[in-house]
Every structure is written in C-alpha cells, then in structure tokens.
C-alpha cells in the first residue's frame, strides 16, 4: 500500500465497517484492473543490495523518478518513502527491504495495464542505470542474507519488524526478502464478491505453481520452486493464509468484517505519528482499548482502512479483491498475472464454469495443495491428478474468458496473448523456477552474475 489512509470519519458500529466494503460495488461496465509488482534493486558492479541513503541509494532513485515524471512525494517523518500521481494514476512505494513497487492505476484492459508496467520499467531503468543499479524480477532475493538486506525508514515497518518475530518464524523474511505480482479486481455485489473470492482462494495454490519463481536463497538453490510461498506458511497465521469461512455458501461481507475485527492491529496514526497497537484487536479498539494511550482514541474510517491493508489472506477483501499468490517475475509475467485472473473472473460464463469446477473442493484439500506447492510445484497431488492438470485447465479457461471479453488493441489482438508465458510453462510441464535452476546448474556454471543478468529488467 503506497499511502496510509487519513480518513477522519468516526466509526462506531459493525454496520459502518460492512458498508465500507459494500461501497466498493460497481456495475460490470465499470470494472477495472489494478496491477502491482515488486522488484529488487542491486548494484551492478558487485550484486549488493541498494540501501535507502547515499548518492546511489533508493532515495536517489525516488528523486530521479520524481524529476523525470512529475510524481508527488510521499513523506514519512520528513523522509521521501514513495511517490504518487495527483491524477490518480498509481503510486510508487517501498517495501521493507527496499523492494521497489509500482501500484498501478485502475485501468480498463490488460493492454493498458501492461503498457503502464512497461512504461514504469523504462523510467526506472533510465534513472537506475545512471546510478549503476539494476532490478531483478524474481519472487525472493537470491543472494543476500537477512542481515545484509537493507531496511527502509518507514515508521509502520518499524512496528511490524518488532511484532513479526512474536507471531511467526518467517515474518522478517517475508518483509525483507520476498517480492510479488498482484492484481486488484472489482465486484458488482455481495454474491459476485463471494463467488470471485471463493474461486480466487481455491485457485491461489495453482497460481503459485504457475508463477513459482523463487528457487534461490543466499546464493544457492533452496530446494523449493517458491521459497516465497513457503515463507508465508509461518508469518502470522492469525492474519494470513486460507480463510475457512470463505468456503461456505453463505459467506458475506459480515463474515470477513467479524474475522478482521479480531485480528490484532499493527498501528494507528494520529497527527502524522504512528502508534504501536499490536496489543489490541480492532474490536477492542472500538470498545475503547486505546483510551489514555493516544490522542483521539476513538476509531476512524482511516484506521479501519489501514487495518484491512495489514491483513494478508491469500485473497484480500477491501473495496476490491487482491489476488496474492504469485511470485515476482520477469516483465511478461507482470502482464500474465492480471490476464490469468481477469480471464477467469471477469467473463461471466468463464467465472460460472470455474466456480462449478471447484465447487466441491474442500478447505482441507486446498490447504493440503497450498502446503505442498512451494516444494512440489506442478507435481503436487490433487485428488486423482496433479496441479499441472489444474494449471492447464485454468489457463485454457482464462484464454476463453479473455477472448469473450473482446478487448482488442490497435493491432487487433485480444488480451489472451498475454497468457503466453503461462501457456509455455504448462506445455513444458515444469515451473519457471525449475528452469532457472537447470540453467544455473548447467550453462551458467553456477554463476550468480549470470543469474542476475538473466533476471534483470
């Protein structure tokens, strides 16, 4: 999330929190696509990570981006920690370990969101090249230890870094050494939200296999196809993973709100200052738990919006749905991720078909699939088959959905050609992670510089 919300509207009832989600509903003709991706900066001369400060640091990249494109600054205690478009055309933010993120604007087509990502990468290259910096498209940092990874000066991350070790073993790895591609999608009403969230959550392990791209840790193969997905198994299980109630036929906004209310908070902001609130849930906050601890201790809508952004289920519900299961990767995959989910979820006939296909999948079955995918990838067993078969079927269904949408570019191509990277991996039958390891162990002769060159945007 690029900026924490400062909406001062008081909130005091459960219904107000539910209405906040419901207010995201919009007619299908107004559905949009918001693509986000993260990438790791490194110094080309020695492959070391890029710190925040210094003439060749992350701050210098943000300054360069600001002067190049007229972005507006996002400040935290006077420090430049991101950029945003005053016209609502997206934002640039920093993840805790310096991962450089584009949160794209809500756009109408995959063509548009892919152009946006490509334009952003071109701008980043123009600035970073002058500083001797490159960027990696991969799901986890392949070389640096946790101790070697820089930490960005963002107040909310200070609170998270203190809290994470209390609730899981891998929280700092998640914060500092992973990167993702996400897509944000709309829903028309509660029933549409329910169907999309249910299908999305059931298929996240399949997406994790399709986009598995994090097989290296601290300079060598780690034995996994998605180290990033494995990390998420032990981050903070109170706020992440699969949500059993989403699998129920009567799942509603209220169910999600009731769950969110009982998840510990990270912080509240007052007068630009962050206050640690990890000792209370939002429900306790609404019951007055922070009285005497902070100024203006009554909950505000901005507090609720910020709290929703600190929940990490495999599909996150805000005023839109966030698909969260994919590793970061090359630029073609930045376009393929929204193409996959838009194809499955935005065409009504395809959504109905994939909902029917997954209708009897149980929480326990999906959880077992999710647990196995980081290591086994496409070989993961599911009932009488394997995840590879599910990947092939869903990529084909996504292609049909995109063709049915009929959104053509200037050359007359529909959006389905953005699925080409996924069609390649399912035709090959091996994940991109396995191919990276094969190249690394073979023709690259275990050379990290060659790996970095291959992964650079």
Image (cartoon, grey):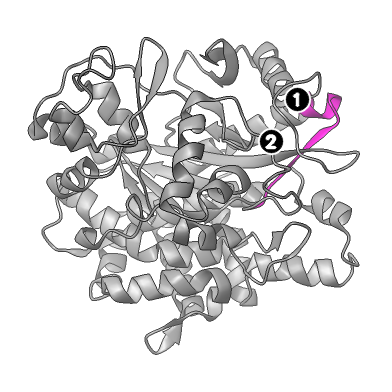
The residue range painted magenta reads 126-138
Q: Position of residue 276 (x, y in %)?
A: 38, 28
- Residue at 33% from the left image edge and 76% from the top image edge: 365
- In the rendered image, the quadrant that contains the N terminus is top left
Tell me if I can see residue 375 in this picture: yes
Per the model, the C-alpha gap separating discs 1 and 2 is: 10 Å
**Residue at image mark 2:** 150
Q: How many marks?
A: 2
x, y percentage for residue 87? 46, 15
- Whether the residues at callouts 1 and 2 have beta carbons within 8 Å, the answer is no
Residue placed under numbered mark 1 in the picture: 57
Q: Is residue 375 above or below residue 6?
A: below
Vertical arrangement, residue 411 with respect to residue 226, above or below: above
Q: Nearer the viewer, residue 331 or 110?
A: 331
Q: Answer few, some or many: residues within 10 Å of disc 2's Cα (few below 14, many 20 plus, some between 14 and 19).
A: some
- Residue 73 counted in the magenta span: no
Nearer the N terminus, badge 1 or badge 2?
Answer: 1
Q: Quadrant of residue 393?
A: bottom left
Residue 193's disc is: none
Which of labels 1 and 2 is toward the front? Answer: 2
Please tell me how crowded label 1 is: few (under 14), some (14-19), or many (20+) other residues with Cα within 10 Å.
Answer: many
- Residue 177 or residue 214, whichever sits in front: 177
Q: Residue at x 47, y 77 (%)?
A: 387
């Amino acid at each position: 999330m690029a900026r924490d919300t400062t909406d001062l509207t008081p909130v005091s009832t459960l219904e107000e929190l539910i209405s906040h989600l419901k207010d995201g509903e919009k007619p299908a003709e107004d559905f949009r696509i918001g693509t986000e991706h993260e990438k790791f900066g490194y110094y080309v001369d020695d492959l070391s990570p890029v710190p925040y400060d210094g003439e060749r640091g992350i701050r210098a990249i943000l300054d360069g981006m600001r002067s190049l494109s007229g972005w507006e600054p996002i400040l935290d205690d006077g420090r430049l920690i991101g950029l945003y478009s005053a016209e609502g055309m997206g934002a640039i933010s920093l993840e805790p370990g310096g991962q450089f993120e584009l949160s794209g604007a809500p756009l109408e087509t995959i063509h548009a969101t892919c152009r946006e990502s490509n334009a952003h990468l071109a701008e980043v290259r123009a600035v970073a090249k002058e500083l001797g910096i490159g960027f990696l498209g991969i799901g986890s940092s392949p070389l640096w230890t946790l101790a070697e990874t820089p930490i960005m000066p963002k107040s909310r991350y200070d609170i998270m870094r203190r809290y994470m070790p209390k609730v899981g073993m891998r929280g700092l790895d998640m914060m500092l050494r992973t990167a993702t591609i996400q897509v944000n999608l709309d829903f028309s009403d509660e029933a549409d939200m329910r169907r999309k969230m249910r299908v999305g959550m059931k298929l996240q392990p399949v997406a994790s296999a399709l986009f598995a791209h994090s097989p290296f840790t601290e300079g060598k193969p780690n034995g996994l196809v998605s180290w990033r997905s494995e990390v998420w198994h032990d981050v903070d299980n109170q706020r992440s993973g699969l949500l059993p109630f989403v699998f129920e036929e009567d799942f509603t906004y209220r169910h999600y709100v009731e769950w969110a209310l009982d998840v510990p908070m990270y912080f509240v902001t007052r007068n630009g200052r962050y206050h640690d609130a990890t000792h209370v849930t939002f429900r306790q906050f609404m019951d007055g738990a922070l009285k005497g601890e902070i100024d203006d201790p009554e909950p505000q809508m901005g507090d609720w919006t910020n709290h929703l952004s600190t929940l990490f289920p495999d599909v996150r519900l805000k005023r839109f749905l966030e698909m969260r299961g994919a590793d970061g990767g090359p630029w073609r995959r930045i376009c393929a991720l929204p193409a996959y989910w838009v194809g499955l979820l935005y065409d009504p006939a395809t959504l109905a078909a994939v909902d029917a296909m997954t209708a009897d999948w149980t929480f326990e079955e999906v959880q077992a699939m999710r647990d196995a995918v980081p290591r086994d990838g496409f070989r993961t067993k599911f009932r009488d088959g394997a995840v590879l078969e599910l990947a092939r079927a869903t990529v084909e269904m996504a292609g049909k959905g995109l063709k049915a949408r009929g959104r053509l570019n200037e050359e007359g191509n529909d959006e389905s050609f953005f699925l080409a990277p996924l069609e390649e991996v399912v035709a090959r039958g091996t994940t991109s992670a396995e191919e990276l390891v094969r190249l690394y162990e073979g023709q690259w002769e275990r050379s990290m510089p060659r790996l970095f060159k291959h992964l650079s945007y």
